Image (spheres, rainbow, N blue to C red):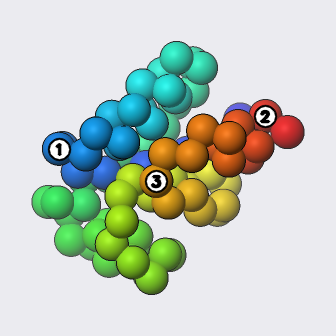
Amino acid sequence: MAIIKIYTTPTCVFCKTAKEYFKSKGLTYTEYDVSTDTDKQKEMIDKTGQFSIPVIDIDGKIIIGFNKSKIDEYLFS
């Protein structure tokens, strides 16, 4: 099973959409709230070079934003 990490903030609509999508597929993920966790915020910026959310890390493959087709490609192909 893939290791899924998602970097979020509490008010991010696309973050909520991504988490709902993972739940609908029965996938587990680890969520990091970068509005309060500065270490994870730095980790996210180091991975992407930017401060856009959500950042989804699927087995080391990075997706910025909620991109369902890219998520499906990384998870199901």
The label shown at residue 3 is none
Mark pair 1, 3: CA separation: 14 Å
Q: Position of residue 13 (x, y in %)?
A: 28, 39
Mark 2 secondary-structure assignment: helix
Q: x, y percentage for residue 7?
A: 37, 55
Label 1 Cα crowd, 10 Å radius (few <14 / some 14-19 / many 20+): few
Callout 3 amino acid: Gly
Q: Is residue 75 visible?
A: no
Estimate the spatial distance between the alpha carbons at disc 2 and disc 1, rounded to whole Å.
Answer: 29 Å
Tell me the kind of residue under disc 1.
Answer: Thr
Comparing labels 2 and 1, the label whose residue is closer to the camera:
1
Q: Position of residue 29 (x, y in %)?
A: 48, 38
Q: Is residue 26 above or below residue 48?
A: above
- The first of marks 3 and 2 along the sequence is 3
Residue at position x 52%, y 17% from top? 24
The structure residue drawn at horizontal position 40% and vertical position 70%, both measured from the top left corner, is 44
Quarter occupied by residue 75: top right
Query: Residue 36, relative to residue 17: is it above or below?
Result: below
- Could you say which disc has been placed on residue 65 in the image? 3
> Which disc number belongs to residue 11?
1
- Dot placed on the residue nearer the N-terminal end, 1 or 3: 1
Q: Position of residue 26 (x, y in %)?
A: 57, 18
Between 9 and 68, the residue placed more toward the observer is: 68
Give the residue at mark 2: 76
**As drawn, which residue projects farthest toward the right?**
77
Q: CA distance from mark 3 to mark 2?
A: 18 Å
Q: Are marks 2 and 1 in contact (CB under 8 Å)?
A: no
